[in-house]
Image: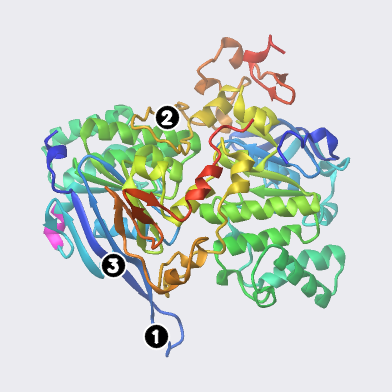
Amino acid sequence: MSSMDRTAQTHELLLKVSRLSVEFAGRKGVAPVLNDVSFEVYAGETVCLVGESGCGKSMTALAIMRLIPDPGRINTGLIELRGADLARYSVPEMRRIRGNKISMIFQEPMTALNPVYTVGDQISEPLRLHQGLSKDEARARVIEILRSVEIPAPERRIDEYPHQMSGGMRQRVMIAMALACDPDVLIADEPTTALDVTVQAQIFDLLREQQQRRGTAIVMITHDMGAVSEMSDRVVVMYGGRVVEEGLTAEILKQPRHPYTAGLIACLPELDPAPTTDRPDLPEIPGVVPSVWQRGVGCPFADRCASVMPKCREGFPQAFQTGPTQKVSCWLYEERS
Amino acid sequence: MSRAQDSTPLLSVRDLKVHFRVNRGGWRKEAAVVHAVDGVSFDMPRGRTLAIVGESGSGKTTTALSVMRLAPITQGSIRFNGTDITSMEGEALRRQRRQLQLVFQDPYSSLNPRQRAGDIVRMPLILMDIGTPAEQKDKVGELFRLVGLREEQRMLFPHQFSGGQRQRLNVARALASDPQLIVCDEPVSALDIAIRAQILNLLRRIQRERGQSFLFISHDMAVVEHVCDDIAVMYLGQVVEQASREAFFSRPLHPYSVALMSAVPTVGGGREKAANRIKLQGDPPSPINPPRGCRFAGRCPAAQALCRDEPPPLREVLPGHKVACHFVTVSGGQVKAPLDGYRALDVKEPMA
């Protein structure tokens, strides 16, 4: 299926994040880590959150899971899962959601798994907690799940500890654990950055296949535009704690509108099957990501942007519609929309 | 440049083996031997960049460390500038290191947090007794400008720099003693994508202007294609393919190289590339008990009985293009490779 036929509208809206703002109060004052972040996730689709480190993509994921570390807090905004606002849930209510309706896989499978429990114990925990399965029922189910994530000899592997497995195997265990209760939404925070490319390819295949079988919506956090192109239906580009561009992946990769998105794609060396001897320098995005304290009222990208205008420093623009699905928060597109 | 015209290779590695003994626990168990690098040979011409690529555990970093004489060499020889440095010791080795410098992967842990930026870059000059204090000071200023830092930043401490700037400091320090060879071990993999381009451009500019040779270790094929002149692909301690950049990227011959290229997600490839990719099963085998035959045989889509029994030698199939595979054949100047058919499926156009 090409990404174009999977138009989001034909599917059920599962997760809706609207105008989410997260701040951290510290000695220096209040740091606005996320600012007005909005996006939607439909059943069966993959949405990628893209950006450099510090742009707020992992914080968005943690906010959805209600796992923001102290002293951070959700200031304003809604996180609606099938219409219910998770931002207002109590701790016990949230505990019934995590690992059940929404689950998350992390970047480094070695640190995300508990080294002193067998993988079987760890995968059966959500099953026993959320579905009330007995020990034996859970064990049978875990073997089945391990088989579905293509772990060889699951009857034996179930009693192994994380250190006895390779990185790719551990990430499969993480996926098995996350999918054990058939969640509506799976959040994958850079699931393959710690893995080799050939293993990454296996994990991507596995995620795609599980998604097709279960109709899970996947929110994948990545900085790799290649992975975006390969995995996602839609993409949300973040910078400085804000969403700067979003739309169908095909549309955005073909014609990025925001100067940041365009720069992010251009500065990437691409594999070329017909390499030429003259290699022009890669286009650079000058400067670095501003810290939360350096973000003013205007566009956070203004200081690195080649098309900066005085207006950019005065206020952050609303999202302008620039294509059938593409929305861009950049003053350059003010007239056109 | 006179350096580049000298025809003897700058670096010549022959049959390098680095084996580590690991205690397997249990008092009667025999110690196991990890064959980290197992018979690697290559030559590095002057003024060029040789990239060694491979996945984790392939031995690429150990090879680089051996060249720097920072890993225990079990067997083989390393000649630098015609001098055998394999068993060089003490002061002679220290002097030799003036010509051999290293840029580390992690720009955070490779700089002393208590030393000022200017002193970090000056350190090699002091240690190697290069120039008078006044000359050293000028040299540091020159190096700062060369790598794109401002001279007044020499009084700052590493934590006051961003990741990209710290990597610039690392490059400046490596350049201080004006070495002939700089080993770069994954110099951009810890950096953000937008910063990678800055450092890659910097390394290429330095090479253009100063004619240094780079031994570039990386797992990222796209980065390697951008920076290298020659490439060696390693798998489980051995080189499986070696060629010039143009020859390799336009036509990788070894099934592992083809699979590795097909596994890289690209912006233009999208889902179609993913659907057509060569699926490698499982993980690389353990370097403790490497397979008897071809080490890639267990995961190779083209493997046959011969592959499991007999290790294929690394042989030259085209001028300058070496490959270690039984089933890459040459007849009448035409090369046939086992996964030739795959290439037709590779998606080159951006997706519609």
Foreground disc of the pair 1, 3? 3
Left or right: residue A263 compared with residue B165 = right
Q: Do tags 2 and 1 sit on the same chain?
A: no
Q: Classify mark 2: residues with Cα within 10 Å, few (<14), some (14-19) or many (20+).
A: some
Q: Do tags 1 and 3 sit on the same chain?
A: yes
Numbered circle sitting on residue B30: 1
Tell me if residue B269 can be seen. yes
Q: Quadrant of residue B345?
A: top right
Prevailing secondary structure class for the magenta stretch in the rendered image: helix
Q: Position of residue A197 (x, y in %)?
A: 52, 52
Question: How many callouts does the rendering have?
Answer: 3
The amino acid at mark 3 is: Lys
Part of the protein shown in magenta: B90-95
- The residue identified by callout 2 is A282
- The front one of A160 and A256 is A256
Answer above or below: position of A282 versus A103: above
Q: Classify mark 1: residues with Cα within 10 Å, few (<14), some (14-19) or many (20+).
A: few
Label 1 secondary element: loop
Q: Position of residue A145 (x, y in %)?
A: 74, 66
Q: Is residue B92 magenta?
A: yes
- The residue identified by callout 3 is B17
What distance separates the C-alpha of mark 2 from that of mark 1?
Answer: 52 Å
Q: Badge 2 sits on which subunit?
A: A
Counting residues from the N terminus, which is met first, the one under dot 1 or under dot 3?
3
Q: Position of residue A201 (x, y in %)?
A: 58, 52
The amino acid at mark 1 is: Glu
